[in-house]
Image (spheres, rainbow, N blue to C red):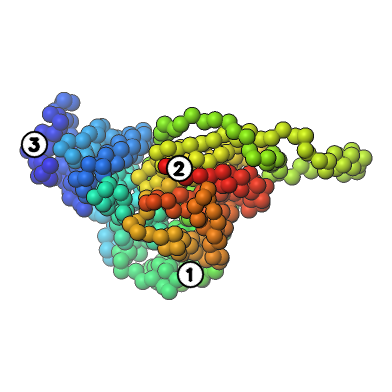
């Protein structure tokens, strides 16, 4: 369809008045809804980069899913409501509520720094919206001044133009309809390294917002700031030396824009918690530190326990290589039909007894005799114990099967980057908030990529994003196929985790099995995980 839609009526309903903007992924128009009293609205036209039929079908599925996300986010009055979405002439359209107001690019002006209090208010205002977005497991991916609207009615900040939907229009797909590369969505000045590599997380939006706050506080555009040898933004030297800022506030901004996302805030809620602890009267008695002291370790965590927002599930296998579980592509999890699950017997394996994660204190001096007897019973042979019945999961579409314990829950995965399944361990008790998990995800390979090339790329990514001390991958066998396996340290929602990742190549696909657990519980679940991995098979 021609981009010049001005003067046309789309879907027999939306009369296009004028063009509002144009970007690399589409065009935005002001329109009138002729079936609703000519109410003004915004129509966004998104154009996929290919006319390939299979690629169009993939883009359609992704577009519909992202539209559903935006519809859910529309329950928040600080996000434009989605009024309609449809496809016409192989283009995709979103119809959204029109926000009367102006964007912050008209307020944050080069050479005109904001006061500390005004910058603080902005941060808190945007973080309130971002918290809701993150509770829906969504990453905005394009937070910048022009996407923050100051609503005329109440001067509140409204978050617009979610970059997740732009993913539909930024895929590079070959003639066979296979994804060859994903173009990073976002604006370079506000985009951290992991997002440039196509692996955004909640912390990526935190970085963008931190850069906006620094831009407002200093009056200096991000692209004009210097970067040190370790990738950190040098911005404190651009502050007004005649003004005393709260040192703790500056430290918060530093942590928001750390180069390594492991050292950044993991959620909007934790940033809000730290901001609420600021005491201007107390801190303004201290001198502002213009050049921040370089710390080798991760910054101190918030003294308040972070809230527990809806946890995102990794939406691609590559996210498992990352150090935090954050949704790539901001997609919702949807179930896809699978073949019938059949209980099968494990091959002579004894059942694994999971240890409690919380030590149970024993009353001192009591039940000594019972402890001795209990210990004798504990170490008696278990040969008469019944075998564990495992369930078989089979995914004919992606070509694999694997066995898993019936007590474990599962969640199907299907997004633009990869698909498969994630198995979650059962909670030990009410205080058990962390679920150990085993994911089996399938990615489409770059043309001609070998097992050694994929392994080299994966290890390099993990070294950069998670564990610089990771050892070389070890050769293993997955089913009847040659594979590789690595064990490395990571971080998830501010807590350390340990991961074991195994993969093999089959045709034009890579199959990745990732086990994630807290370090102290890693060995407890390892026998069961080993049994699951041993049962894995690729199928035609």
Q: Give the mark nearest the N terminus, 2 or 1.
A: 1
Mark in front: 2 vs 1? 2
What is the secondary structure assignment of the residue under circle 2? loop
Which residue is at the front of the view, 437 or 258?
Answer: 437
* Mark identifier at residue 149: none
Q: Residue at x 43, y 74 (%)?
A: 229
Asked if residue 217 lies left or right of residue 248, the reply is left
Q: 10 Å neighbourhood of mark 1: few (<14), some, or many (≥20)?
A: some
Residue 474, compared with residue 90, is above or below; it is below
Q: How far from the left and from the top, in percent, is residue 38?
A: 14, 29
Give me the disc on residue 292. Answer: 1
User: Could you tell whether 438 is left or right of 195 in the image?
Assistant: right
Position of residue 275 relative to residue 158, above or below, is below
State the mark number for residue 8. 3
Q: Quadrant of residue 129?
A: top left
Q: Which residue is mark 2?
A: 539
Name the secondary structure under disc 3: loop
- Between circles 3 and 1, the one closer to the viewer is 3
């Amino acid at each position: 369809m021609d981009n010049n839609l001005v003067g046309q009526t789309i879907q027999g309903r939306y009369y296009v008045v004028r063009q509002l903007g144009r970007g690399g992924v589409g065009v935005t128009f002001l329109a009138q809804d002729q079936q609703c009293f000519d109410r003004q609205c915004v129509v966004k036209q998104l154009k996929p980069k290919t006319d390939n039929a299979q690629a169009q079908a993939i883009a359609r599925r992704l577009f519909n899913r992202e539209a559903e996300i935006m519809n859910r986010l529309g329950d928040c009055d600080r996000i434009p409501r989605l009024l309609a979405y449809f496809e016409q002439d192989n283009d995709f359209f979103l119809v959204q509520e029109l926000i009367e107001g102006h964007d912050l690019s008209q307020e944050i002006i080069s050479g005109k720094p904001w006061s500390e209090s005004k910058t603080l208010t902005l941060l808190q205002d945007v973080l309130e919206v971002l918290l809701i977005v993150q509770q829906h497991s969504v990453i905005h991916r394009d937070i910048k001044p022009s996407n923050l609207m100051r609503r005329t009615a109440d001067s509140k900040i409204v978050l617009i133009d979610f970059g997740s939907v732009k993913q539909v229009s930024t895929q590079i797909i070959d003639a066979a309809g296979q994804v060859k590369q994903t173009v990073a969505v976002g604006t370079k000045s506000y985009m951290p390294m992991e997002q440039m590599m196509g692996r955004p997380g909640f912390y990526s939006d935190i970085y963008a917002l931190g850069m906006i706050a620094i831009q407002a506080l200093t009056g200096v555009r991000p692209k004009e700031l210097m970067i040190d040898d370790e990738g950190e933004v040098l911005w404190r030297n651009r502050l007004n030396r005649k003004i005393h800022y709260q040192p703790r506030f500056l430290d918060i901004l530093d942590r928001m824009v750390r180069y390594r996302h492991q050292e950044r805030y993991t959620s909007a809620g934790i940033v809000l918690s730290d901001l609420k602890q600021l005491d201007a009267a107390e801190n303004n008695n201290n001198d502002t530190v213009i050049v921040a002291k370089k710390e080798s370790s991760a910054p101190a965590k918030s003294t308040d326990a972070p809230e527990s927002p809806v946890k995102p599930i990794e939406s691609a296998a590559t996210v498992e290589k990352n150090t935090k579980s954050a949704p790539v592509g901001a997609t919702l999890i949807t179930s896809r039909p699978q073949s019938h699950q059949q209980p099968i017997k494990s091959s002579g394996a004894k059942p694994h007894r999971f240890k409690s994660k919380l030590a149970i204190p024993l009353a001192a001096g009591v039940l000594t005799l019972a402890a001795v007897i209990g210990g004798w019973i504990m170490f008696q042979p278990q040969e008469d114990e019944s075998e564990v019945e495992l369930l078989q999961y089979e995914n004919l579409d992606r070509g694999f099967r694997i066995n898993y314990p019936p007590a474990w829950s599962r969640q199907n995965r299907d997004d633009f980057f990869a698909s498969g399944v994630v198995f979650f361990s059962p909670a030990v008790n009410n205080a058990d908030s962390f679920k150990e998990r085993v994911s089996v995800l399938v990615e489409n390979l770059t043309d001609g990529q070998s097992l050694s090339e994929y392994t080299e790329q994966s290890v390099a990514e993990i070294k950069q994003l998670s564990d610089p001390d990771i050892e070389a991958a070890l050769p293993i066998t997955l089913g009847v196929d040659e594979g590789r396996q690595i064990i490395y340290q990571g971080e998830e929602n501010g807590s350390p985790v340990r991961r074991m990742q195994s993969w093999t190549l089959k045709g034009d696909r890579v199959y990745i099995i990732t086990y994630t657990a807290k370090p102290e519980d890693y060995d407890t679940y390892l026998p069961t995980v080993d049994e699951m991995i041993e049962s894995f098979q690729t199928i035609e």
